[in-house]
Image: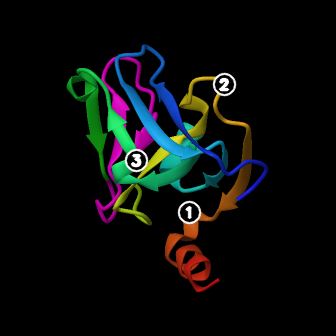
């Protein structure tokens, strides 16, 4: 994966800190910079982990709103108060959680490799990605 594959617990959340979570992932991650209409407007660059490695904390669920469009497979979550999407459930990995790497608290991510993903042409890009 990269510089350091050690698994660590990352903490993070939204801007106003009403949504807080922990995620177990490597200290070196690959983040996807998607250009689909939603991700490009939000500036979302994310890495994905299995759902079992993601845990919402406290009363975070009370502050989450969800937006869907197109196939309604992806669940774009955001904070009802500050509007930040700190995580969501992606179309390409419905059994995982995609975490916005910029929403991870400082100190646990050693390295982030950013890869461009052509979400504007999702079907073609996803097919190409799964064939390699």
Say which element carries label 2: loop
The image position of residue 97, as x and y in percent, is 41, 50
Residue under the point 56% across and 47% down? 46
Point out the stretch of residues depicted in magenta: 69-88
Nearest to the observer: residue 55 or residue 130: 55
Residue 83 included in the magenta stretch of the image: yes
Give whichever of discs 3 and 2 has the lower sequence position: 3
Give whichever of discs 2 and 1 has the lower sequence position: 2
Judge from the rendering whether residue 46 lies leftward or rightward of residue 71; answer left or right: right
**The label number, if any, that marks residue 4 in the structure image:** none
Q: The N terminus is located in which quarter?
A: bottom right
Which callout, 3 or 1, points to the residue nearer the camera? 3
Residue under the point 34% across and 61% down? 95
The image position of residue 34, as x and y in percent, is 60, 55
Judge from the rendering whether residue 111 lies leftward or rightward of residue 69; answer left or right: right
Nearest to the observer: residue 95 or residue 117: 95
| Res 44 → quadrant | top right
The residue that label 3 is drawn on is: 53
4 vs 81: above or below: below
Q: The C terminus is located in which quarter?
A: bottom right
Looking at the image, the residue that sits furthest to the top is 16
Q: Overall secondary structure of the magenta stretch?
A: loop
Structural distance between the alpha carbons of marks 3 and 2: 19 Å
**The label number, if any, that marks residue 119 in the structure image:** 1
The image position of residue 59, as x and y in percent, is 23, 21
| Res 43 → quadrant | top right
The residue that label 2 is drawn on is: 107
Structural distance between the alpha carbons of marks 2 and 1: 30 Å
The image position of residue 45, as x and y in percent, is 60, 45
């Amino acid at each position: 994966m990269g510089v350091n594959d050690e698994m660590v617990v990352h903490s993070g959340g939204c801007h106003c800190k009403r949504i807080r979570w922990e995620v177990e992932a490597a200290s070196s991650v690959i983040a996807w910079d998607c250009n689909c209409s939603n991700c490009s407007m939000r500036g979302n660059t994310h890495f994905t982990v299995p759902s079992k490695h993601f845990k919402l904390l406290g009363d975070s669920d009370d502050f989450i709103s969800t937006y869907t469009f197109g196939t309604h497979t992806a669940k774009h979550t955001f904070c009802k108060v500050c509007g930040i999407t700190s995580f969501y459930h992606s179309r390409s990995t419905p059994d995982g959680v995609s975490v916005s790497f910029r929403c991870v608290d400082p100190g646990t991510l050693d390295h982030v490799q950013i890869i461009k993903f052509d979400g504007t042409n999702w079907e073609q890009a996803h097919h190409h990605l799964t064939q390699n």
